[in-house]
């Protein structure tokens, strides 16, 4: 690509042939544009668009890899999906993940950002420390937390040393999901903190100075200045966090659940893990594709809500 | 409450939080240096620190290979994404041509489709074309990203047209203008894009898990997961050595590039 665009220009002696060079300039621009877009367009069409349409198509078929027959079944896969208690459980768990995880991330992330705003020394060091978990391997971190929360792992040993009862943690259908959520909050906290720090910096200092003159308390300042003006940032964080929790949870669940498949008793099963099991363990591609369409609609709904909320004007 | 007391409380909270953020890593490294006899003790500093676990991991398992696979995949993907996304972003930001709006909207629309929705067709494609179980199968879905195109378009727009036109008058070819004039102007955005791409590919788990079958070609995350839940289950000193090898390179990269990374997040988050 590079060579062709150079060739078109190299024979020109720019100063000598001005009238012709202008025409060639336009031609060479077009040539450059279409030549450079060729490979990306092929990529987007074959690797993105066709597969997306193909997914919808597979979703309407009974599509088992092992059988040559792939009959059209209309909406049957979707009906079967919503009748499957395991799918409903995975939907429910996904919402638990989002509800607790995103709330935790946003509240703690904002809290850390507010604390960091109040100090003058060591800000950089704290920022780096809180950020480290975000930039490291998810699988490695999942196994470290699994080790910490094992029957005879660090946390239980500490509990028994303090005279408290040991817990089942990842072996407990009631606790496992919250351990996984906590791991995810721990890991994404730094990201949220950085976003909030940037958002806080955008709030004009004069508002706080004016409030101080009026003798407003810290809480009052937070409630009537910081929170409203930070609203767009909060919406952004919630949306990014929700989409992340839907998609990323796969890695954590597979590596932290005791059966690697959303256990115990499907208590940590999320939609993506369900899709994976259906498609690559039971080879039921049709129903799995239908489930990915449901996932797509959820992500789409979150994105549309985000655009609606963010396009509102915020008055300063 | 006076100012001093307030700041003591703030620092105390931040320090307690820092300990929570760092402790898992300390525990990971500490366990990886312990002998099997000591692994269940609560001591943070091992009595007889040993690198035996690391030696075993590199000698008796495929961790070395997985490390190299991960590195190759992450580097190749990053180069491809950085080059193509920057180029496409530049073209959409700086040229008028037929089909421009449609192409841009089409690329943006891919952002709304979660990867999970594409894995089944990708898998069927891969098995059809013999792309499973090799580097190409791992690479092909991530060669370009809609996010990168969008990001680079936003930054390319800030380059003044006069600058590019001046280069044209000087007789510079279009590709040279892109390479020599446009790229240096948006270097911070490109480096942010590179860092995120590298990070997400180093972390990729779902697609590699699906497309790979033979352990020789695994990437680190898939390898570590396979290792830890396989025959070495509950050998925590070995699993933690593996986890350290997987996690530490990223932490080291972060220490050298932390200013860029944090700035990059702020840039991309606010755009």
Image (cartoon, grey):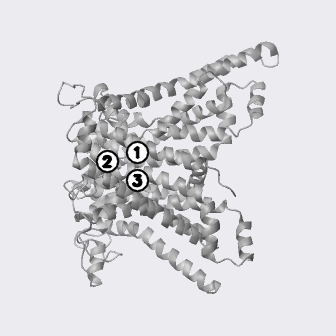
Are discs 2 and 1 both within one chain? yes
Which quadrant holds the N terminus of chain B? bottom right
Q: Position of residue B166 (x, y in %)?
A: 78, 30
Cα–Cα span, label 2 and label 1: 11 Å
Q: Which residue is mark 1?
A: A298
Callout 2 crowding tier (Cα within 10 Å): few <14, some 14–19, many ≥20: many
Q: Earlier in the sequence, mark 3 or mark 2?
A: 3
Q: Earlier in the sequence, mark 3 or mark 1?
A: 3
Quadrant in the rendering for residue B29? bottom left
Label 1: element kind: helix
Q: Which residue is depicted at the point 76% across and 16% down?
A: A21
Visible in this render: residue A285?
no
Label 2: element kind: helix
As displayed, is residue B230 above or below residue B210?
Answer: below
Q: Which residue is mark 2?
A: A271
> Image check: A17 left or right of B68?
right
Label 3: element kind: helix
Q: Which residue is depicted at the point 52% across and 30% down?
A: B106
């Amino acid at each position: 690509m590079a060579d062709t665009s150079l060739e078109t220009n190299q024979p020109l002696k720019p100063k000598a042939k001005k009238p012709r060079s202008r025409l060639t300039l336009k031609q060479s621009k077009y040539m450059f544009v279409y030549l450079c877009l060729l490979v990306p367009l092929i990529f987007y069409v074959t690797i993105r668009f066709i597969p997306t349409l193909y997914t919808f198509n597979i979703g309407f078929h009974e599509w088992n890899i092992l059988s040559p027959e792939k009959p059209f079944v209309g909406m049957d896969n979707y009906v079967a999906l919503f009748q499957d208690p395991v799918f409903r459980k995975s939907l429910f768990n996904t919402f638990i993940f989002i509800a607790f995880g995103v709330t935790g991330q946003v509240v703690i992330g904002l809290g850390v950002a507010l604390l960091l705003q109040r100090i003058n020394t060591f800000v950089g060091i704290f920022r780096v420390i809180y950020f480290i978990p975000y930039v490291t391997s998810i699988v490695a971190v999942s196994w470290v937390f699994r080790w910490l929360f094992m029957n005879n792992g660090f946390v239980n040993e500490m509990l028994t040393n303090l005279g408290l009862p040991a817990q089942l943690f990842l072996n407990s259908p009631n606790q496992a999901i919250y351990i996984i959520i906590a791991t995810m909050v721990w890991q994404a906290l730094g990201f949220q903190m950085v976003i909030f720090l940037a958002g806080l910096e955008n709030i004009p200092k004069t508002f706080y100075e004016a409030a101080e003159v009026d003798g407003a308390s810290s809480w009052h300042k937070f409630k009537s200045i910081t929170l409203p003006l930070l609203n767009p940032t909060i919406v952004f964080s919630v949306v990014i966090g929700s989409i992340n929790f839907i998609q990323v949870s796969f890695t954590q669940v597979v590596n932290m659940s005791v059966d690697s498949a959303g256990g115990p008793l499907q208590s940590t099963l999320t939609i993506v893990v369900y899709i994976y099991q259906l498609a690559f363990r039971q080879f039921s591609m049709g129903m799995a594709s239908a489930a990915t369409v449901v996932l797509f609609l959820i992500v789409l709904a979150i994105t549309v809500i985000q655009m609606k909320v963010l396009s509102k004007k915020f008055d300063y | 409450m006076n100012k001093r007391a307030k700041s003591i409380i703030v620092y105390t909270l931040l320090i307690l939080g820092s300990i929570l953020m760092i402790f898992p890593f300390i525990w990971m490294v500490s366990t990886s240096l312990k002998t099997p006899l000591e692994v269940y003790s609560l001591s943070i500093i091992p009595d007889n620190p040993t690198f035996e676990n690391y030696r075993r991991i590199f000698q008796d398992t495929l961790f070395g290979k997985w490390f190299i696979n991960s590195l190759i995949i992450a580097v190749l993907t990053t180069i491809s994404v950085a080059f193509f996304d920057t180029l496409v972003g530049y073209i959409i930001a700086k040229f008028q041509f037929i089909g421009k709006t449609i192409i841009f909207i089409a690329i943006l629309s891919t952002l709304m489709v979660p990867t999970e929705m594409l894995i089944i067709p990708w898998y069927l494609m891969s098995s059809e074309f013999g792309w499973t179980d090799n580097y190409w199968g791992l690479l092909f879905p991530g060669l370009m990203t809609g996010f990168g195109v969008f990001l680079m378009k936003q930054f390319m727009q800030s380059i003044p047209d006069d600058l590019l036109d001046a280069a044209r008058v000087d007789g510079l070819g279009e590709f040279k203008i892109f390479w020599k004039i446009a790229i240096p102007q948006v270097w911070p955005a490109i480096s942010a894009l590179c860092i995120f791409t590298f990070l997400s590919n180093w972390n990729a788990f779902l697609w590699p898990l699906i497309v790979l079958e033979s352990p020789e070609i695994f990437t680190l995350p898939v390898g570590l997961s396979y290792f830890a839940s396989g025959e070495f289950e509950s050998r925590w000193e070995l699993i933690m050595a593996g986890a350290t090898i997987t996690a530490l390179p990223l932490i080291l990269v972060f220490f050298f590039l932390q200013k860029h990374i944090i700035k990059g997040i702020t840039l991309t988050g606010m755009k």
